[in-house]
Amino acid sequence: MAYSDKVVDHYNNPRNVGSFTKDTPGVGTGLVGAPECGDVMKLQIKVNVETGVIEDAKFKTFGCGSAIASSSLATEWLKGRTVDEAAKIKNTDIVNELKLPPVKIHCSVLAEDAIKAALQDYKEKWSASEAPAGRDAS
Amino acid sequence: MALKLPIFMDSQSTTPVDPRVLEAMIPYFTEKFGHPASRNHPFGWEAESGVDVARDQIAKLIGARDPKEIVFTSGGTEAINLALKGVVETLDVCKRLERQGVEVTYVPVGRDGLVDVEAVRAALTDKTILISIMFANNEIGTIQPVAALGKLAKEKGIIFHTDATQAVGKTPVDVEAMGIDLLSATAHMLYGPKGVGALYVRRKNPRVRIAPMVDGGGHERGMRSGTVPVPLVVGFGKAAEISREVMAEESQRLAGLRDRLQEQIVSKVDEAYVNGHPTLRLPHNLNISFAYVEGESVLMGLNKEAALASGSACTSATLEPSYVISALGVDSELAHSSIRFGLHRFSTEEEVDFVARKTVEVIHRLREMSPLYELAKEGVDLKSIHWKAE
């Protein structure tokens, strides 16, 4: 199976690889997938608590090239969006952008799940006025 | 010297045709194009003699006493089908009725991929008619105790089949010494052409009968009808002859290169686990699981420079991890992380060094991106996490 140019580009030059410390104010972490399924994504957002705008995003992914590309693309799209806008990103948007074949659609689903999990974690930790101590997002 | 990229290291999927093999085949496409079953003119005789020579060359490679024991097929898959279905079909009518649903017992393998002969013995019943084993595995290269299984089969009067597609020409195979009744082989694993294989069918002690899967003109002693593809068969024969001559020296050379490849990778990558048996394995085969990275992403990082496989080439279209690696009792994330290297007749030391270096680079790069590697380095036990699978 040949990969699309965009998948290859994200794989060779992944955007925003890395991690934020989980208890940094405004950071939400999503950890989805399972090692035995061959895909695990960790996606983190750093939100300006005042404005609700995602100022930075990072990822780390264990998975195939399409999974790496899906999460890399997700971090690109998340930056600059508000939390509410970010919640509207759909896996089909990722499929279309990366031209994923049918056998790789699950990678985009996982990326959407990771976005949702990161947003949820952010909301639980930081949007309810005072911030509780950072907890393991998983 | 500049390396020609990508380097082919996937010899368990297929092998390049040896130029000597191709040379032997060409006349049978051009001037010697006759049908080997045409008995009444020189075109037929010429083609028939080409097939006879090939039959003899293959019989010699696997230690068959009689070239008549070689039945040409379209490849390994057909040879295996013919062996297994052919044996079951030849049972007399009562037994056939009794076996409307043929019962199959799968005997597990150990951590090194070896089957335990005593476990096979324990799995036999008074109704067992056939034991079948892969001589050497295509993913991990483990070589099974074929001679011991052959002995067991003889002792019990059970027909013994082995799928030797990966083994023939790579490691010594002797149907007489090993008590093999049926053996499947394919040309393209030993530097011969694709589209031709053979089934060895024992003719004496015992005489094994198989029902044909393909009916027609009764070619190949009635066991496989259809015009014998002479050029392919001639190529198969030539490939067998070359393998028989060079196998001892070649397997030693390839084992040396394989060990070099393994050492260069394992010494530079932590948590790299070699799959299969440390010594009872094919000389050209190396299979390593790299913890915390997924196999397909490793191949993607290498595919401009080296053609390798993760799991089996047959299953690269599916997302399931390798069932072979899983059967070893390895954690499934390690099955997802397995990479197979396959050296071959034309592999060089320079290629090995290059592929080792590139592999190490890619593994390190992917681990930097791996959340599992990060967690493990933080001292988190990955098994303690409640993973939310899709």
Image (cartoon, coloured by chain):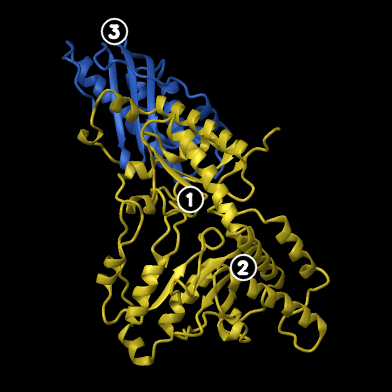
Return the residue nearer the eye: A50 or B152.
B152
Distance of label 1 from label 3 (alpha carbons): 47 Å
Asked whether the residues under marks 1 and 2 belong to the same chain, the reply is: yes
* Residue A4 in sight in this render: no
Residue B317: mark in rendering:
1
Which mark's residue is nearer the viewer, 1 or 3?
1
* Residue B94 in sight in this render: yes
Lateral position of residue A105 relative to residue B29, left or right: left
Please name the residue that numbered disc 3 is placed on: A50
**Which chain is yellow in the picture?**
B
Residue B44 horizontal/vertical position (percent): 77, 82
Q: Colour of chain A?
A: blue
Secondary structure beneath dot 3 equals loop
Q: Residues within 10 Å of mark 2 (few under 14, many from 20)?
A: many
Residue B172 horizontal/vertical position (percent): 51, 63
Distance of label 2 from label 3 (alpha carbons): 71 Å
Return the residue nearer the eye: B325 or A42.
B325
Label 3 chain ID: A
Which mark's residue is nearer the viewer, 1 or 2?
2
Please name the residue that numbered disc 2 is placed on: B196
